[in-house]
Image: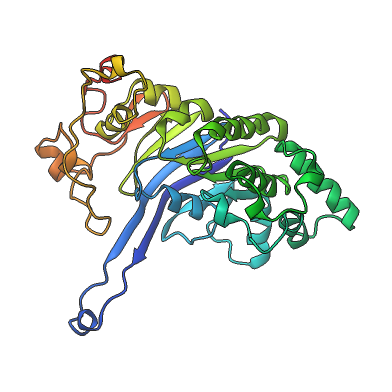
Amino acid sequence: MAKPLFKARNLTKHFDITQGFLQKLRGEEKQKVKAVDGIDFDIYWKQNFSAVGESGCGKTTVGKLMMRLLDPTDGRMYMKGKDITELSNKQQIKAYRRQTQMIYQDPFSALDPRHRIRTILEEPLMIHGIGDSRDERDDMIYEAMEEVRLTPPEKFLRRYPHMLSGGQKQRISLARAMILNPDFIVADEPVSMLDVSVRAEVLNLMKDLIDKEDITYFYITHDISTTRFFTDYIGVMYLGDMVEKGKVGDVLDNPSHPYTQALLVAVPEPDPERGRGVKKVPIKGEIPSAVNIPKGCRFHPRCPHSKKICRNKKPVGKEVGKEHIAKCHFAGEIEFDLEVAK
């Protein structure tokens, strides 16, 4: 079996909550936000992996850990078999970030409004010392612009970001990431702030670059409906944990965790006739605080199938199919009719 391009083991990130004067005086223990709480996953070359879940589940924090924008509290990360968790030297981190780039959710704030597009695209080349002359860097900029289908490049290079549409801004963000020829891109909800009419165009463009430039994506999204089209593997996150993971078709066609089932039911049905008589999975209440994670299964306060064991014992990953794992005591036993739920 092929070795993973990227591997995470027990990846953990806890944030300390600042204490007030009286809390310090009373000697109260510092509370922590358990944003990412010990997750494992593998990403294979040219096999895109998506992290899905509600806002606040920890998926963006995972992306920042992978980029080494945050230091993990515990656990290890490996890129091409090399441990990147302990990278501390600025030159080592700089070299790592040349092969691992990030596309941010908001293209409106991701680009410096004071700089023209040419300067924005040249900046990563200057930082990494790529290109011996301005003409050589210009050739790279033109090539990157053509790859993201902003042609002719001359039409855009002297513009400022505010002179572009949202879709054009996100293409510039993609070009800026691609210009360094990375192996891996963390895409943090890259189409969530774009008009519906251009979302498919941007996702198609990103997908075309997988084979053309040998790119692999870690795709962060709350829109589970796009994962089947864009990714090969999926990890469903809830309260900092990856509660279900596997090949995207297996997980979406045979969801084995109640939370995954609830996410699938929540996908809007555009056909009003099919939408009638929908069988809803009754999720109760609100997402608990990441400071006080429930004992046992962290989903049990909202789960319609919760039993005594769920309240007292933390579930471990249960294999329900090849490469398909769900952290539920009753994984594989809970029936879910996709046709009824649609």
Name the residue rendered at 84%, 53% in the picture: 137
Quadrant of the snapshot with the C terminus: top left
Q: Residue at x 45, y 50 (%)?
A: 60
Residue 301, x across and y down, in percent:
16, 43
List x then y, in percent, for residue 236.
Answer: 37, 37
- Left or right? Give the position of 46 relative to 323: right
Callout count: 0
In this picture, residue 224 sits left or right of residue 317: right
Q: Which of the image's four quarters has the N terminus?
A: top right
Return the residue found at the far left.
Answer: 308
Query: Could you say where residue 158 lies in the image, as x and y percent from the top left?
Result: 77, 54
Relative to 126, is 298 above or below? above
Q: Left or right: where does residue 204 sit relative to residue 29?
A: right
Q: Position of residue 271 (x, y in %)?
A: 35, 18
Report the colour scheme: rainbow
| Residue 190 vs residue 269, the one in the foreground | 269
Residue 132 in view:
no
> Could you tell me which residue is drawn at 75 percent across and 47 percent down?
156
* Quarter where residue 335 is shown: top left
Image quadrant assignment for residue 327: top left
Q: Is residue 228 visible?
A: yes
Q: Nearer the viewer, residue 223 or 218?
A: 223
Using residue 53 as the reference point, say whether residue 231 is left or right of it.
right
